[in-house]
Image (cartoon, grey):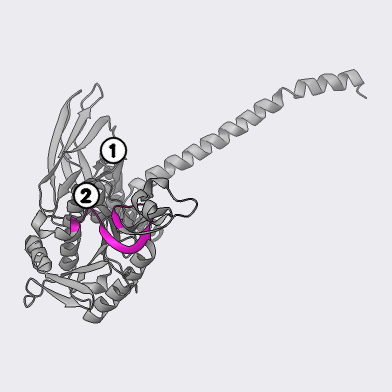
């Protein structure tokens, strides 16, 4: 029988080994997790074709050994040799420093957009050839990277297509090693993606062509106020009135304090409202024309420091600066929802109650009845205009009245200034 002292000594001898055992188990688990991660990473290098070749080689080898078919065994050896050889192509370091530079982050449709890649070997040894891949929007550019000596650099210039308005994601840049058959592909990412904004085309609007934007001193309304610029009438003083507006001469004549009343003046507030519904345009290019028209008028309003609200059937656009407005127009995409320009008119009436000029922009698929209804739901007293973008050969530049909306049919952006001179007449 063990004594209490012996039991205590045994416990003390066993206790230190428990933490060591726990640490061993922890190291084993950590090593297993790391091994699984490395296995997943290595497995991700194998392409679909690589898995097919590897699977076919294994099946052929098992079948050849099982049935003693020498030809099948030879085929299996050839397939497995391809896989092993492909792995050899992917082995190697990627000791690069890669920089992606866009000459400009914003260009206009049709302008030349250039970028550059600079790859530097930061190791102390030469690096075997590799391939550089650069996603540009939905496409992918590929550049052959030659053998680079220690510290050597390699530059690549590239052009980005800008035929269409939109935000083009450029990057991330990756270096790729792999076999010529594409069985193994090992890629390493080097940069973050960058965005190139391809702004819509705009045109300068002359002052004579946009007279409706220059009502900056305001216009009189039927609303009566106690303080403004346009005198309306006199009335008796009531407690709380500002004594600065007491008309002393009339007060002396009548024996009663009389104060001035004014008609409220309202600063011009332009609302540019663009339909982004696909069903409102007979052709996608009509939507591009409408966006360009809205962009041109918006830039003119910002430059004139007019009060402006720019919106679509889906959102209100930021427009504190020309860049903000053009960036917002660049991100616009056509939608397929039941929303119509009538709903857009109701939104304006609800959210922009101080609007004085409302311009709706849409395509040739909008019906005259929809235009009349949209004008009818706008706030009372506003001046309603519309730009109807149309690429129909039978449609010429012209203005006509539909209900309380003056509709300008616009076949090309270049005719926008002349079109608004027609509106002013």
Whichever of callouts 2 and 1 sits on the residue coming sooner in the sequence is: 1
Q: Quadrant of residue 390?
A: bottom left
- Tell me, for residue 302, which label it has, or none: 2
Is 189 drawn above or below residue 288 in the view shown?
Answer: above
In what quadrant of the picture does the N terminus appear?
A: top right
Q: Quadrant of residue 234?
A: bottom left
Determine crowd level at label 1: few under 14, some 14-19, many 20+ residues with C-alpha closer than 10 A: some
SS assignment at label 1? loop
Residue 170 visible from this viewpoint: no
- Depth check: give the residue in front, 99 or 44: 99
Q: Is residue 216 magenta?
A: yes
- Depth check: give the residue in front, 388 or 176: 388
- Tell me, for residue 250, which label it has, or none: none
Q: Please state the horizontal and vertical placement of residue 130, each as a whole percent of the image.
A: 21, 38
The residue positioned 72% from the left and 22% from the top of the image is: 16
Is 53 drawn above or below residue 159 in the view shown?
Answer: below
- Give the residues drawn in magenta, as a range: 213-231
Q: Please state the horizontal and vertical placement of residue 422, each as a whole percent of the image.
A: 8, 68
Q: Please state the horizontal and vertical placement of residue 168, each as a whole percent of the image.
A: 23, 50
Determine crowd level at label 2: few under 14, some 14-19, many 20+ residues with C-alpha closer than 10 A: some
- Depth check: give the residue in front, 411 or 384: 384
- Depth check: give the residue in front, 177 or 71: 177
Q: Is residue 289 magenta?
A: no
Q: Please state the horizontal and vertical placement of residue 27, each as a whole percent of the image.
A: 57, 31
Residue that carries the numbered disc 1 in the rendered image? 191
């Amino acid at each position: 029988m063990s004594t209490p002292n012996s039991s205590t000594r045994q416990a003390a001898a066993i206790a230190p080994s428990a933490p060591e055992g726990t640490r061993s188990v922890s190291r084993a688990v950590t090593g297993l997790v790391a091994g699984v991660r490395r296995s997943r990473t290595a497995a991700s290098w194998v392409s679909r074709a690589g898995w097919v070749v590897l699977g076919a080689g294994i099946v052929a080898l098992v079948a050849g050994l099982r049935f003693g078919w020498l030809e099948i065994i030879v085929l299996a050896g050839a397939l497995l040799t391809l896989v092993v050889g492909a792995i050899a192509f992917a082995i190697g370091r990627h000791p690069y420093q890669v920089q992606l530079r866009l000459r400009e982050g914003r260009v206009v449709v049709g302008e030349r957009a250039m970028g550059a890649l600079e790859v530097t070997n930061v190791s102390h040894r030469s690096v075997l050839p590799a391939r550089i891949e650069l996603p540009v929007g939905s496409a992918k550019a590929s550049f052959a990277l030659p053998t680079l000596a220690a510290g050597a650099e390699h530059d690549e210039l590239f052009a980005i297509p800008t035929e269409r308005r939109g935000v083009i994601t450029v990057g991330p840049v990756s270096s790729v090693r792999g076999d010529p058959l594409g069985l193994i592909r090992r890629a390493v990412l080097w940069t973050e993606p960058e965005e190139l904004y391809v702004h819509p085309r705009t045109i300068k609007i002359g002052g004579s062509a946009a007279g409706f934007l220059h009502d900056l001193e305001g216009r009189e309304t039927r609303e009566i106020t106690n303080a403004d610029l346009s005198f309306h009438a006199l009335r008796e003083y009531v407690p709380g009135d500002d004594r600065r507006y007491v008309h002393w001469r009339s007060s002396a004549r009548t024996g009663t304090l009389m104060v001035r009343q004014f008609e409220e003046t309202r600063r011009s507030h332009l609302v540019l409202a663009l339909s982004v519904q696909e069903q409102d345009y007979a052709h996608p290019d009509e939507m591009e024309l409408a966006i360009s028209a809205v962009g041109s008028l918006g830039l003119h309003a910002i430059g004139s420091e007019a009060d402006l609200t720019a919106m679509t059937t889906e959102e209100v656009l930021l427009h504190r600066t020309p860049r903000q407005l053009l960036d917002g127009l660049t991100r616009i995409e056509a939608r397929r929802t039941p929303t119509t320009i009538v709903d857009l008119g109701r939104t304006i009436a609800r959210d922009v109650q101080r609007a004085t000029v409302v311009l709706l922009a849409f395509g040739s698929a909008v019906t005259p009845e929809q235009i009349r209804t949209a004008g009818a739901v706008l706030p009372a007293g506003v001046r309603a205009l519309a730009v109807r973008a149309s690429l129909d050969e039978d449609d010429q530049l012209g203005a006509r009245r539909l209900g309380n909306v003056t509709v300008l049919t616009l076949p090309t952006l270049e005719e926008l200034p002349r079109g608004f001179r027609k509106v002013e007449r």
